[in-house]
């Protein structure tokens, strides 16, 4: 099979999604992702079975770097994997790719590559982004830890929370948490030392002997150490 293509199915959505990583990790993820896309064709439902050695050969990365990078892509829900007897099968998350029918000038209806790759395939538009993908991932990854679940959901944009219709209970709690965090971020707090000073002052004033000492110093024109005032 000719594994070359006239264009690549990579979107800025994926590029921005990988901003969570450092520079070298991001570049390794893109490198390995492109290697997978070389073998994951639409007619195979964007799935491919590859060994680490194959990806390492194509990306010029070490096997251990390839393994760690693929694990990162899976944690970020860019790919999913199924382990088999002869290796792993990798499936590309189609939220991060465009329809193959939206090709460039080099990938036209008249090209042999287009006809080969689009046999019995109808033209379809760019995949619609599912805004609740992050919500489902957070709920799945934090199941059993309600505090972390709600806190992570509350960090999502309000528009994304409002778009979800499958998890009304969690969304309601997340919105309430978001309001609480916003209120706390705008609150004005008294410096701790000022609070301590005021509490110390109250404690002194409640001591009868301290009050007697203060009155004595006032009557005899003495300072707080009992010395005559100048």
Image (cartoon, rainbow, N blue to C red):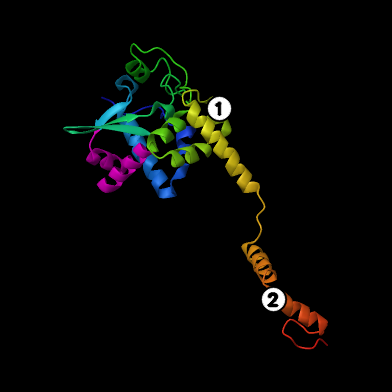
Left or right of 125 on screen, residue 79: left
Residue 185 is marked as none
Estimate the x, y position of residue 165 in percent, counting from the top left.
50, 23
Q: Which residue appears at 33% of the width and 13% of the height?
A: 119
Viewer-nearest residue: 198 or 121: 198
Against 214, residue 142 (above or below) is above
Residue at image position (52%, 34%) is: 173
The quadrant where residue 33 appears = top left
Residue 66 is one of the magenta-drawn residues: yes
- Magenta: main secondary structure: helix
Q: Nearer the viewer, residue 174 or 69?
A: 174
Question: In this view of the protein, can residue 62 be seen by the observer?
Answer: no
Q: Residue at x 32, y 22 (%)?
A: 45
Image coordinates of residue 169 in percent, x first then y, are: 49, 28
How many marks on residues? 2
The residue identified by callout 2 is 210
- Residue 41 on the magenta span: no
35 and 77: which is toward the camera: 77
- Which secondary structure, mark 1? helix
Q: Evaluate whether residue 93 shows in this view.
A: yes
Task: State the CA–CA distance, disc 2 to disc 1.
Answer: 61 Å
Q: Residue furthest left?
A: 85
Between label 2 and label 1, give the one nearer the viewer: 2
- Disc 1 packing (10 Å; few <14; some 14–19; many ≥20): some
Residue 212, compared with residue 227, is above or below; it is: above
Residue in view at x 75 percent, y 78 percent: 214
Circle 1 is placed at which residue position?
A: 162
- Work out which quarter of the rendered image holds the N terminus and state it: top left
Find residue 61 and report its horizontal and vertical position in percent.
30, 46
Over which residues does the magenta segment extend?
A: 50-77
């Amino acid at each position: 099979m000719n594994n070359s293509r006239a264009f690549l199915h990579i979107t800025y959505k994926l590029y921005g999604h990988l901003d969570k990583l450092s520079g070298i990790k991001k570049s390794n993820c893109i490198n390995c992702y492109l290697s997978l896309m070389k073998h994951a064709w639409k007619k195979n439902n964007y799935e491919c079975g590859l060994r680490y050695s194959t990806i390492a050969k194509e990306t010029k990365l070490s096997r251990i770097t390839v393994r760690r990078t693929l694990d990162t892509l899976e944690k970020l829900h860019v790919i999913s994997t199924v382990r088999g007897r002869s290796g792993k099968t990798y499936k590309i998350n189609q939220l991060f790719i465009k329809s193959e029918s939206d090709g460039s000038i080099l990938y036209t209806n008249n090209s042999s590559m287009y006809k080969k790759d689009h046999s019995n395939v109808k033209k379809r538009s760019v995949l619609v982004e599912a805004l609740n993908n992050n919500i489902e991932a957070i709920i799945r990854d934090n199941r059993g830890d309600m505090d972390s679940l709600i806190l992570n959901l509350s960090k999502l944009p309000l528009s994304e929370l409002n778009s979800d219709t499958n998890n009304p209970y969690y969304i309601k709690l997340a919105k309430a948490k978001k309001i609480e965090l916003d209120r706390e971020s705008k609150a004005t707090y008294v410096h701790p030392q000022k609070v301590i000073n005021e509490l110390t002052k109250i404690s002194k004033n409640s001591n009868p002997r301290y009050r007697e000492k203060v009155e004595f110093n006032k009557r005899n024109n003495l300072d707080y150490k009992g010395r005559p005032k100048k």
